[in-house]
Amino acid sequence: MIALTVSLRVRPGCRDDFLAAIKAQAERSFTDEPGCLSFDVVCDLSDDHHFVFHELYEDEAAVEAHRAAPHFAVWREAAATYVVPGSQVNTLSRRLFHHS
C-alpha cells in the first residue's frame, strides 16, 4: 500500500472555502476511486490554517489514477486559490504495518 501525506497552509480568510473544497475532494476520491482506501483530513491543534491529509492507496497505479481523476483537476484549481504558495509538501511512502 502507498501512503500519500500532504501538509499545507491555507491563506487567511479562505479556511471555510478551503474546507468545502477539500471535503468534496476527499469524498470523491474515496467513493469514485476503487484504489483509494482512505482519505483523512486533519487540522493542527495549534494552527487552524495548517492541514495534513493522510491518504492511502492500493498501489502506485491507484495514486496515478487519483491524480488523473476529473475531481483532482477541480481540487488543483481550488488549491491554487486557497493554499499559501510554496507551503504544500507531498510525501509518498510505503505502508509497512498498521495497528487499529
Image: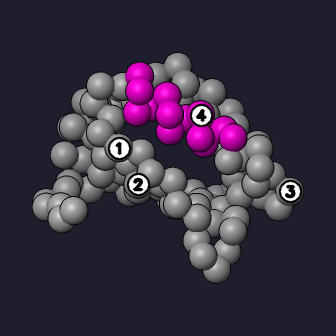
Residue 24: mark: 4
Tell me the CA gap for discs 3 and 2: 24 Å
- Name the secondary structure under disc 3: loop
- Name the secondary structure under disc 2: strand
Look at the image and say whether residue 98 sits in the magenta stretch: no
In the displayed structure, 69 sits above or below 84; it is above
Query: Which tag, 1 or 3, sits closer to the chain's start?
Result: 3
> From which residue to which does the magenta span run?
20-32
Residue at image x 26%, y 56%?
A: 93
Q: Nearer the viewer, mark 2 or mark 1?
A: 1
**Residue 27: horizontal and vertical position, in percent?**
50, 34
Query: Which tag, 4 or 3, sits closer to the chain's start?
Result: 3
Q: Nearer the viewer, mark 4 or mark 3?
A: 4
Residue 54: mark: 2
- State which quarter of the image contains the C terminus: bottom left
At label 4, counting other C-alpha atoms closer than 10 Å, the crowd grade (few under 14, some 14-19, many 20 or more) is some
Residue at image x 31%, y 46%?
A: 56
Asked if the residue under mark 3 is in contact with the one under mark 4, i.e. CB atoms within 8 Å, the reply is no
